[in-house]
Amino acid sequence: MSVSSDFEGELVVRTLEAAGIEAHVFSATARTLSWMIAPSRPIRVQVRRRDLERAREALEARRQELEQMDLESLEGLESEGASEISGRGSSFMSRVAILVLVLMILLIVATVVRGLFKSL
């Protein structure tokens, strides 16, 4: 499977490892050695062939989980001390930041899942 950034590769690997699937991202060394030759090469994430179907299922499950995530449940992440110091506007900005983060993760996971199905 290919991804477009180191961050996306690490996100995929961590998701798969959480599902008990061994995965590896090949990025930093390959990009360092080939920066002059092929700087736009995709970053590879690899799993064992026997784990491929489980990996697809784990990534799809994670994508669905993120889509169903209730942003209101994340409201408790803001500490009381921080909201007292920064005022009322911080709660709204925290929600906006969390929404942007969740949307970015959804985009990354959707791109990865699409890449998995294209590689079939």
Image: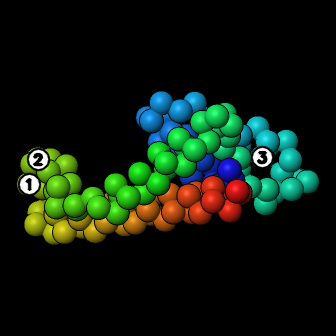
Dots 2, 1 in contact, CB < 8 A = yes
Place of residue 47 in the rendered image (x, y in percent of width and height, measured from the top left): 64, 37
**What kind of element bears circle 3?**
helix
Tell me the residue that label 3 is attached to. 31
Amino acid tagged 1? Glu
Regarding residue 78, the answer to whether it shows in the image is no
Amino acid tagged 2? Gly
Q: Which mark is residue 8?
A: none
68 over 50 or under it: above or below: below
Question: Could you give the CA–CA distance between mark 2 and mark 3, rounded to whole angstroms?
Answer: 43 Å
Most distant residue in the right direction:
37
**What kind of element bears circle 2?**
helix
Question: Could you give the CA–CA distance between mark 1 and mark 3, rounded to whole angstroms?
Answer: 45 Å
Left or right side of 24 for 65? left
Tell me the residue that label 1 is attached to. 84
Of badges 1 and 3, the one in the foreground is: 3
Amino acid tagged 3? Arg
Q: Which mark is residue 81?
A: 2
The residue sitting at 62% across, 42% down in the picture is 52
Regarding residue 41, the answer to whether it shows in the image is yes
**What kind of element bears circle 1?**
helix
Of badges 2 and 3, the one in the foreground is: 3
The one nearer the camera, 87 or 24, is: 24
